[in-house]
Image (spheres, grey):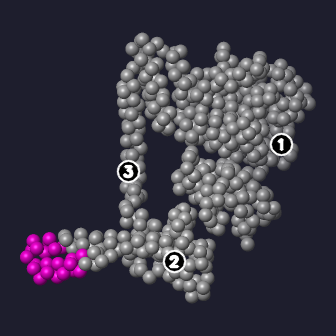
Amino acid sequence: MDDIELIKEKINIVDLISEYLPVKKSGVNFKANCPFHNEKTPSFVISPERQIFKCFGCSKSGDVFTFLIEKEGVDFKEALEMLASKAGIVLKQAPDKKDFTSRLFEINLKAQEFFHYILTTHSLGKKALEYLKNRGLTSSSIEEFGIGYAPNSWESLTKFLLKRGFSHQEIIQSGLGVASKSGSYDRFRGRITYPLIDGKGKLRGFSGRVLYPAEPKYINTPQTPIFDKGNLLFGLNLAKGEIRNKKEAILVEGEMDMIMSFQAGFKNIVASKGTALTEGQIDLITKYTDNISLAFDMDLAGDSACRRGIEIADKAGLNIKVVQLSGGKDAAEAVSENPSLWQKAIEESVPIYDYYLTSTAKRYDTKNPADLKRIGEELIPVWAKITDDLVRERYIQRLSAYLKSDEKIIRSAVDKERNTKLQSYTNVLKTASAKDNVVPSKSRRELLEEYLIALLLHLPKDFNFVPTFPETLFLAEKWRQIYVLLVIYLDSISFKSRAFEINEFVEGLPKELTVEVDRLYLTELDSKLSDNKFWQKELEGVVSELKKALIKASLQKLTLEIKNAQEFDKMDVVESLNKRFRDLSVKLKNL
């Protein structure tokens, strides 16, 4: 048995998912609100028997590995390592081959060790240490966050790393060095360094703040195989527990904003490293809370990149508020001057769409026609993208009152904007459907075929049954194939008086059929179907409906054939077709 199978055997998917969200027993399965999209009615089903999950709302599905990859934002290898550790399994590794990403993590740790030593111990870091102390940072915060200093030298870190067995190529690939004719030189020079650590405590890169104004204020590790700025929130490794406890994340812009606030006791705080929130960052937040308060030292409403991030957060179902900082201060300055006022600002944070209104009120004059037009251009598209109908309606009313305009005019403008967007999305979907030959909605017949297979996969307990209706009942090839294989399997276990085992049935099925079987097996059917008689009656009803549908289709075809034969005066053919039509009509009536 390989590592993957061993992990699947030892880790129960229900136990794993229960660590992230509350689950409730529902028949033989478990249900929960989906962690991957916003919903009020649970559609996320977990099967302890199949050791899989399936969301019938957003269609995400998979096993323990898939869940961890989606929930934690890790790759397969990281998920494998995390689950192996949880299961107490030592992974088999080739002793002579060291993993490339492991080397990148190692080199980052060595660099952090170097930077931190220079800041806290070496004379080269004296000015940087004085700067941090003057900003109000304590020695314990410097230790807790692993802050360091990169000397204003071209090769000090490079030489340090080369002596410890790392190559120029590895230094460049890690983003710590820049390629040169002689090999590489240090990327971070004359800068205070902040280790960029992910939510699981892995050091993925660095941010460097300059001490000398001639250089750009901040630089970051460039994108590497282990670092993507858009998928990281500074301080999450330290703040995630308190975010979960307080059910809210406060987002600030920079590292110092986060550190100074954390030091002052505001523990549910992270830094986004910029005002333009990304999908990756929002995914990280939704693992711990549905509530965020943005505390940026700028006008969010006037920043298009920030607005895009807020739209993404709204679509993800987050409740968004804005902490309003007075006097153009950033969070670090606010908390340093008066922690109680910073606390008050957080407590008095306002819903994002209220903030948009007050922001436009400060910038525009509603009596000025040109400003009135600008308000519409700025707010109507934002209102149109509000996903919740009730919230959108409320802010249509608020905007109407603010502009002293008729609600109908505002609503019409918002609806027009929404319809324009929806039309473009619809066209994209139609194009994609045409390319993939996908039917957007299922017919009643298709749904009946699916339901019939679902019934056969949900046999009542201790009920031996082998269906005898013909495979021609199914028009869809996939359901026909599954039906034939089901009949063969049910016949074999009936002969041996054995119970239906879903894992035994899917073993050896083609992957595309297994996906469909799992989907239908996880579909929650009426609880009354556990009764043999009720189940049989339901099955007979569905089979009868499908037979009727087949006969009706045949009658429609015969009608056309009769019409064609009459046009060409083929009366003998007409008579024959009429006889078939009568026979089928009688058959339909008797069903």
Q: Nearer the viewer, mark 3 or mark 1?
A: 3
Dot 2 lies on which element?
A: helix
Residue 287 is left or right of residue 105, and the answer is left
Q: Are marks 3 and 1 in contact (CB under 8 Å)?
A: no
Q: Position of residue 88 (x, y in %)?
A: 81, 61
Residue ID for mark 3: 430
- The residue drawn where x is 37% and y is 55% is 434
Residue under numbered circle 2: 486
Confirm whether residue 201 shows in the render. yes
Q: Residue at x 68, y 60 (%)?
A: 13
Query: Magenta segment, which residues?
Result: 561-585
Q: Secondary structure at mark 3?
A: helix
Instruction: Say the numbered circle drawn on residue 299.
Output: none
The image position of residue 240, as x and y in percent, is 74, 40
Residue marked by disc 1 = 110
What residue lies at 71% left-to-right and 62% top-to-bottom? 12
For mark 1, give the secondary structure.
helix
- Residue that appears at 37% across and 22% down: 406
The verdict on residue 571 being magenta is yes
Q: Which secondary structure dominates the residues rendered in magenta?
A: helix
Quarter of image, res 223 = top right
Q: Name the kind of residue labelled 1 in the image.
A: Lys
